[in-house]
Image (cartoon, helix red, strand yellow):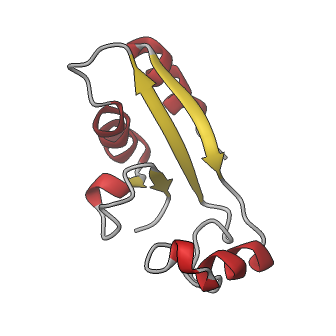
Amino acid sequence: MLPCAILAKAKEKGIQVRINSAVRDYGTQSQMYNSPKYKGVAASPDKSRHVRKDAFDLTLSCADKNLNPYEYLGTYAEKTLGMRYGGHCKIATERWHFDYGN
């Protein structure tokens, strides 16, 4: 699910990648959607790209303090792989979210 190209690009720039979440089943997404903790953040299970198996959430870190790893990999994913990431779509507060949405 996580494109190898993103991992290769991250390695090239010294960006550490941790996968926090990827595919979620309908029940897990439903629990998140109905939880006060995720209110306004988690999509309904009928609309979740995680349930549809085309989204993942990453934690990125980098020793280079002049490089924003989310912006760097997000822009790469958009331009090269046709993906979206949370920094450039309607879920702009979710910089960790990458998906194959349109």
Q: Residue at x 58, y 52 (%)?
A: 56
Towards the viewer: 42 or 48: 42
Q: Quadrant of the C terminus?
A: bottom left
Q: Residue at x 50, y 57 (%)?
A: 99
Query: Would residue 27 appear left or right of 69 to someone viewing this image?
Result: right
Residue 78 at what x, y percent from top left? 35, 47
Q: Vertically, is 74 above or below 69?
A: below
**Furthest-front residue in view?**
36
Towards the viewer: 20 or 23: 20
Q: Quadrant of residue 47?
A: bottom right
**Furthest-left residue in view?**
66
Q: Residue at x 60, y 30 (%)?
A: 4
Residue 6 at what x, y percent from top left? 50, 32
Query: Would residue 43 appear left or right of 45 to someone viewing this image?
Result: left
Residue 68 at what x, y percent from top left? 27, 31
Q: Vertically, is 52 above or below 45?
A: above
Q: Residue at x 46, y 23 (%)?
A: 10
Q: Vertically, is 98 above or below 93?
A: above
Residue 74 at what x, y percent from top left? 35, 42
Q: Vertically, is 65 above or below 26?
A: above
Report how many numbered discs are placed on residues in the image: 0
